[in-house]
Image (tube, rainbow, N blue to C red):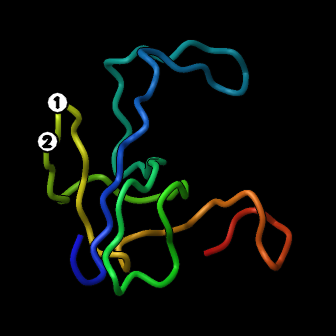
Amino acid sequence: MLHDRVMIKVEQEPEERRSSAGIVIPATVKMANRLVWGEVCGVGANARSVKVGDKVLFNPEDQYEVEVHGQTYLVMRERDLHAVATQTTEHGTGLYL
């Protein structure tokens, strides 16, 4: 990856979801403008806040897709990420924005 680009493998959502009340939401129901989690698989030299293996929260719309060895990844700028989840941080929360 070059500059501040980040390559992300999107976590696949299950076919159907359940609400907090236990109601089954079928896979055909799509929610608009939903952010998704993914795993960072590659970072450019100028990426400052993320590293390979981090889980990140981002908007998958309007991003570039690339296929490598049969696996689909998204490529985006680091500034397009909304949050990074790590195992340990200086602040102790495990999630920083």
Which kind of residue does numbered mark 2 sit on? Glu
Looking at the rendering, in which quadrant would you find the N terminus?
A: bottom left
- Residue 64 horizontal/vertical position (percent): 15, 57
Write down the residue under mark 1: 70
Write down the residue under mark 2: 67
Q: Is residue 60 above or below residue 48?
A: above
Which kind of residue does numbered mark 1 sit on? Gly
- Residue 15 horizontal/vertical position (percent): 41, 15
Looking at the rendering, in which quadrant would you find the C terminus?
A: bottom right
Residue 58 falls in image quadrant: bottom left
Residue 42 falls in image quadrant: bottom left
- Residue 67 horizontal/vertical position (percent): 14, 41
Residue 83 falls in image quadrant: bottom right
**Mark 2 crowdedness (10 Å alpha carbons): few <14, some 14-19, many ≥20:** few
**Residue for point 56% across, 12% down:** 24
In this rendered view, identify the residue nearer to me: 46 or 60.
46
Q: Secondary structure at mark 1?
A: loop
**Residue for point 47% across, 60% down:** 52
Mark 2 touching mark 1, by CB under 8 A?
yes
As drawn, the label of residue 40 is none
